[in-house]
Image (cartoon, grey):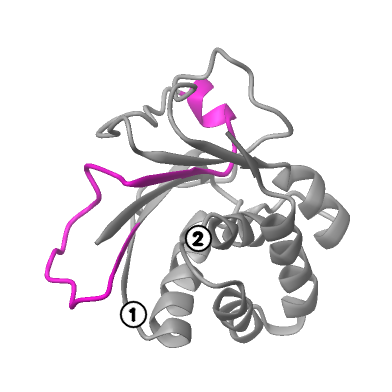
Amino acid sequence: MKQIKIFGLGGQGVVTAAKVFAKAVALGEGRNALSIPAYGHERRGAPVYSDLILDDEPIKLRSFVYEPDVVIIFDLSVLDKGVDVMKGASSDTLFIVNAESLPAHLPFAGHPVRFVDAEKISLEELGRYIPNTTMLGAAAGAGLCGLEAMNEAIRTGFGAAWEANVKSAGRGYHELRGR
């Protein structure tokens, strides 16, 4: 079982990303996936999160993720807004972050970290700062799902905008860096 927590800001497609990710894993790879959105007082720019559970076996757990194996951060400003991205993380928790580079002062600096400049990519490919498909590509690049399964879920879930979003995901996959 892989438990994933996704953090971002309202308007960045956090909940949509979790749903598309689950669809990619379930339909594209034949594994089990459960997307658990956290709804509340979301508004554009407010911190939001969504959880995701992936497994080869049926998923019997029906709760939020409290001990994530992977934390995906769409926007580092969630740290400035009081979001504790470290809550429940172990020393093995992988962090996948939207960042051009990683300053040493980040709370997860001692953890495995992969990063991609999803802001730049989404602005170039989509014409606006919506990093969800770039970060989905990054998640695929980190080995959480195959890129083709992710691309198919994006193709069927993004209507007329699917092509630019698939391109954005591909760049997230190929431009992922890490330490």
Q: Residues within 10 Å of mark 1 (few under 14, many from 20)?
A: some
The quarter in which the C terminus is drawn is top right
The residue at 33%/80% (across/down) is: 31
Specify whether residue 66 is painted magenta. Answer: yes
Stretch in magenta: 52-81
Mark seen at residue 31? 1
Q: Is residue 113 visible?
A: yes
Residue for badge 2: 143
Give the image quarter of residue 114.
top right
In the image, residue 127 lies at what x, y percent? 85, 57
Q: Secondary structure at mark 1?
A: loop
The residue at 38%/81% (across/down) is: 26
Would residue 154 appear left or right of 122 to someone viewing this image?
Answer: left
The residue at 18%/78% (across/down) is: 58
Q: Secondary structure at mark 2?
A: loop
Give the image quarter of residue 122.
bottom right
